[in-house]
Image (tube, grey):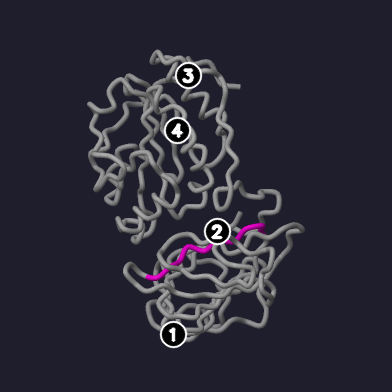
Amino acid sequence: MLRHRNEFPVEGVLPAFDGATAWLNTEPLTPADLQGRVVLASFGTYTCINWLRSHPYVRAWGDKYASQGLVLVGVQTPEFEFEGDLGNVGRAVRELNVQYPVAVDNDYAVWRAFDNHYWPALYFADAQGRIRHHHFGEGEYEESEMVLQMLLREAGADIDQGLVKVEPEGVEAAADWASLGSPETYVGYGRAVGFASPGGFVPDERHRYSAPAELRRNQWALGGDWRVGVEPVLLGEPGGAISFRFHARDLHLVMGPPVAGPPVRFTVRLDGERPGPAHGIDVDENGNGTADYQRMYQLIRQPPPIGDRLFEIEFLDAGVEAYVFTFG
């Protein structure tokens, strides 16, 4: 149940978005454009699985309440350098059906103005420009929508109490939390854990890696000619592979060719076999797929029962960069 509005004290003043490096779907929004409007600022970055799973709710609120005084502003603050490329961001915005204004925050100026620390993060401002509520991470969608309704009513809008009905699909579907036994895992040496190739990393140099005979849960390995950097690993020759023993319904990998690089073909295997009905939306039943730009690719969505599985991806072309595994 939503708390009484007196329990939503003023948390601060809504900062301006003038630190944005670019805007998509709109001309730059000024404080004058937002005056007298309820504002929902939604921080995310387009490869973040937690933002992707919360996005269908935010998108639905924008659609429902735009005509009743809500201004939804997406803030795209990159985690990885490629997420600052306007070509990548623009393509992701189109593919994810983001039709509301997006402030591209490559310099983290908007992030700092809000003193934000999370993807996703929501900040709710009333028609007087005061932040009245915030939410970090996934979940609590009903309460968040009821806060919006309260603020719109305070501003004089006639809002019914019905909530949006959202049925997320694909990468936007909620995680299977009960069976999720693998954590987000970065593959660059800056934040990597669980790396099991014999000899460990050879940082910032091309090196031929191999996988051990067996991986334990949440261990992963490289095979082939890779250059391991602080963030990405870069494949130098065709035929390189990454293996990961995981426990989850879904497996995703943020990867792709560098900006303006050619597409990279790949093949996925699960316990040494084609994935069949366990394939993700970015591969077919035989495990074949193509990475044509840097984004999050869903490679496995397996039916129950969920157990420890060995995932392997082999790249048929050189040039791919891989950043982080996420699970759901």
In reply to whether residue 164 is colored magenta, the answer given is: no
Circle 4: residue type: Asp
- Residue at point 24% right, 29% down? 31
- Residue at point 63% right, 71% down? 311
Q: How many residues crowd around disc 1 within 10 Å: few (fewer than 14), some, or many (20 or more)? A: some
User: For the residue labelled by badge 3, is the local secondary structure a helix, a strand or a loop?
Assistant: helix
- Report the Cα–Cα distance between label 3 and label 1: 57 Å
- Can residue 47 be seen in this snapshot? yes
- Report the Cα–Cα distance between label 4 and label 1: 46 Å
Circle 3: residue type: Met
Which residue position holds label 1?
Answer: 237
> Disc number at residue 41?
none
User: For the residue labelled by badge 1, is the local secondary structure a helix, a strand or a loop?
Assistant: loop
Label 1 near label 3: C-beta < 8 Å? no
User: For the residue labelled by badge 2, is the local secondary structure a helix, a strand or a loop?
Assistant: strand
- Report the Cα–Cα distance between label 3 and label 2: 35 Å
Which residue position holds label 4?
Answer: 63
Q: Nearer the viewer, mark 4 or mark 2?
A: 4
In reply to whether residue 255 is colored magenta, the answer given is: yes
Q: Nearer the viewer, mark 4 or mark 1?
A: 4
Can you tell which quarter of the image residue 72 is in? top left
Which of marks 3 and 4 precedes in the sequence?
A: 4
Which residue position holds label 3?
Answer: 150
Q: Magenta residues? A: 248-257
